[in-house]
Amino acid sequence: MKRIFLFACIGLALFGCKDKVSDDNDMNRYVNKWLYDNMDLLYYWNEELPDYKSSYSNPADYFETLINDEDRFSAIFESYEDIANRLNGVSAADVGFDFQLYRESSSNDNVIGVVNYVKKGTPAASLGVERGDWFTKINGKQLTITNYSELLNSFYDSTADVKITFALVGNGQITNLSPTTITKVVNYEEDPLYLDTVYTVQSKKIGYLVYNFFTNDSGDESMKYDLEINDAIGRFKDENISELVIDLRYNSGGMMSSAINIGSMLVPNLTTGKVFTYTEYNQNYTDYFNSSEYKNQSTDDPFVDNFATTITADYPAKQTYTVNNVGDKLQRIFFLTGSSTASASEMVINGLKPYINCVLIGGTTVGKNVGSVLVHDEDNTKNQWAFMPIVLKYFNKDHQSDFTNGFTPDFEIDDNYAYPLGDVREVLLAKAISQITGASQVQAAKARSFGAEVRSVGLRNKQPHGLVVKKKAIELYQQKSR
């Protein structure tokens, strides 16, 4: 399995690692001390941590006591293996579709879900589940504000299947259908590149990509997903596109390295040394990166990331590929966005803004201008907890990072689920095409008499919001601190 920034106990004296823990209370106390010591070392806001107090609390509850008021994104997980796999797009069990939740009405507590897209090669796809299908019940229980989190867990737990009650929705009425039993996929590997195609509309060549999360590969160091995107961009270049639409509406982030590679495929005048992003850390990191000790070991500058001109894969054999760049063919890029567009997605937009006109269509993005590492205890196998603390803040080449409230779209349009992704009548894509051609293709939104969106962070597809950072500099800091 690929390592994704495994921070462990940093020194026996610092963490007091031990092989045996007498009971659950002692284990909780050990894990909580391990959490605190790592947060004190790594956390972006480490200077504002409360004083340490020994605690027997559940680690998830204890972790919340350490979170800074400015921090919306640090997260903790009971299983390191599960979260490491998920960050690579691998689910231990998967229902087979991505979804969004809404309040049924402001006058009741019911929740209704809608399918954003169906994952390829799954039983759900074989059964004919489609984008725009609505559902109200899971295993016979109505979704509500108080139980939706618990019920949605059955989409990903170890049971073989789940019963979902889909519904017909129209004219303010919801009519439940007979329950459908969907077999879940075990160890499902989702390809983040959902769709790539080229449209010719009024002599305009328009490239279109649907990209749903950022990861290099499924954990095998092959870089297969970054190379797949690279091949798609190469085809766009060969077909001589003059306009590009990147659909990130369901993309909540992922690997920073993939964000750099994809940004490099899009920036005009790609050259070595061109700045993609600057990075700010806590004082511990900053002092080490400025030290002669670090500079004697590495010539890499951990405070800046440049656009990449090559992609190197280590499996099945080490090989370097040239980045296919289409930026020189473009005057602008259309990004389709929504309430799930976060972190690595926002990094690409922010990093490209100084170089090319970025036109946003859809909904306001999340506003995540910070990045995490995945921390795991390598020295005590009894401790299966892992967490992702915020460790850095990023800025573009103009030192801009002022989007904590999200990027506001240039054209605000609700996702209405009326057409499949890639259909030129689909409301967000149609708006982009109309801006390119000047001909209106935007269809009237399907009526929806529902309440506010339910922000099911971490549940939508069990893919956490995140910008997961992997830098040689931080690996050296890890080795120094052990």
Image (cartoon, grey):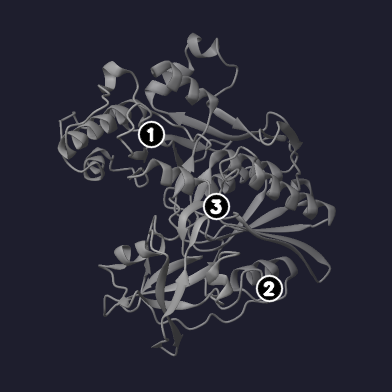
Q: Earlier in the sequence, mark 3 or mark 2?
A: 3
Residue 148: which quarter of the image?
bottom left
Q: Quadrant of the C terminus?
A: top left
Amino acid type at image mark 1: His
Q: Amino acid at mark 2?
A: Val
- Measured in 3D between alpha carbons, the distance from the residue under mark 3 to the one under mark 2, in whole angstroms, is 22 Å
Name the residue that disc number 3 marks: 213
Give whichever of discs 3 and 1 has the lower sequence position. Answer: 3
Please, what secondary structure does the residue beneath circle 2 have? loop
Nearest-to-viewer mark from 3 and 2: 3
Three-letter residue code for mark 3: Phe
Q: Along the polypeptide, which appears first: circle 2 or circle 1?
A: 1
Disc 3 versus disc 1: nearer the observer: 1
Q: Residues within 10 Å of mark 1 (few under 14, many from 20)?
A: many
In-image side of 91 versus 229 (left or right): left
Q: Is residue 343 visible?
A: no
Q: Residues within 10 Å of mark 3 (few under 14, many from 20)?
A: many
- Name the residue rendered at 67%, 47% in the picture: 356
Q: Position of residue 276 (x, y in %)?
A: 61, 36
Residue under pointer 2: 424
Helix, strand or loop status at disc 1? strand
Q: Secondary structure at mark 3?
A: loop
Q: Determine the CA span between mark 2 and mark 1.
A: 45 Å
Could you tell me if the residues under marks 3 and 1 are in contact, i.e. CB atoms within 8 Å?
no
Task: Tell me the number on the disc at residue 343.
Answer: none
The percent position of residue 89, horizontal first and vertical second, equals 53, 51
* Tally of numbered tags: 3
* Crowd around label 2: few <14 · some 14–19 · many ≥20 (10 Å): some
- Label placed on residue 376: 1
Residue at 32% over, 29% down: 380
Q: Nearer the viewer, residue 101 or 358?
A: 101
